[in-house]
Amino acid sequence: MIRHMNSETKGTLHPITLVTNDIVRIFSELGFEVAIGPEMETEYYNFDALNVPKDHPARDMQDTFWIKNVPQTLLRTQTSGMQIRYMEELLKKEQKPPFAIIVPGKVFRNEATDATHEAQFHQLEGLMVGKDISAANLKAVLLEFLKQLFGADAQIRLRPSFFPFVEPGFEVDVWTGKKWIEILGAGMVHPEVLKKGGIDPLEYSGFAFGIGIERLVMLKYGVTDLRVLFQGDVRLNQF
């Protein structure tokens, strides 16, 4: 899978950077603004404001890196916290939807490392809010994104799923030519999340999605072990 490179080979951008740049370019062309949030986050923005129940297992030490001696503070487990932060900023500026943002960045989860899991990885959150936004808009945006990333023959399907901050929720699969591969979670923004951001859910609706960037890297470049991407192996120059 990895070709040996000689010592004179010049360096290049890391595959995660290459794919992140592609994602940002595609969504920017689709009208999305890039927003950046803090990696050290509060429990409120990471969980509470996103409608995650107090007894949800994701809050446990087994899933979350809590900051010692700093109450209710953690290394973010998802980039979704920027949903609320961005909506709050709009409210402060007395601005209203429509808007569309993507939030690329590193996230952290306290879990065992293997070929498909790491304690740190990269995620991209997407959020679009406006009047009459529907699941059809969600599917159209994601399909266009994947066609640009993987080619015109890309196909996707939405399967019912559950995430506390969306209703209804979906798992999104892409057809690889041989089988369906799950690549992201998505759904219509839960009314309680819109309320927390100061947006009237009776007037506006929206969709959100979260993409694991390493998953896309593995699909695009045929990487079979996630850990390779974090080992500083110069042979990654082949990409």
Image: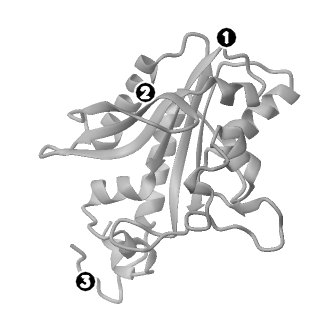
- Give the percent coordinates (x, y) of residue 193: 67, 30
The spot of residue 133 in percent (x, y) is 53, 16
Residue type (three-letter) at the residue carrying disc 2? Val
The amino acid sitting under disc 3 is His
Q: In which quarter of the image is residue 232?
A: bottom left
Q: Is mark 3 on a helix, strand or loop?
A: loop
Of pointers 3 and 1, the one earlier in the residue sequence: 3
Residue in the image at 56% along x and 63% along y: 63
**Can you identify the residue that label 2 sits on?**
141
Amino acid at dot 1: Leu
Across and down, in percent, residue 214 comes to 41, 59
Mark nearest the camera among 3 and 1 is: 1
Q: Which of marks 2 and 3 is nearer the N terminus?
A: 3
Residue 228 seen in this snapshot: yes
Q: Quadrant of the N terminus?
A: bottom left
Numbered tag placed on residue 4 in the rendering: 3
Q: Nearer the viewer, mark 2 or mark 3?
A: 2
Q: Distance between the residues labelled 2 and 3?
A: 38 Å
Q: Name the residue under label 1.
A: 202
Quick one: label 3, few (<14), some, or many (20+) residues within 10 Å? few
- Mark 2 lies on a secondary structure that is helix
How far apart are the two marked residues, 1 and 2, measured between alpha carbons?
23 Å
Q: In this view, does 161 lie above or below 202?
A: below
- The correct choice, above or below, for 12 with respect to 83 in the image is below
Find residue 211 and report its horizontal and vertical position in percent: 46, 46
Q: Can residue 105 be seen in this view?
A: no
What residue lies at 64% left-to-right and 43% top-to-bottom? 53
Q: Nearer the viewer, mark 1 or mark 2?
A: 1
- Residue at the bottom extreme? 7
Quarter occupied by residue 215: bottom left
Which sits in the foreground, 46 or 57?
A: 57
As drawn, is 165 to the left or to the right of 199? Answer: left
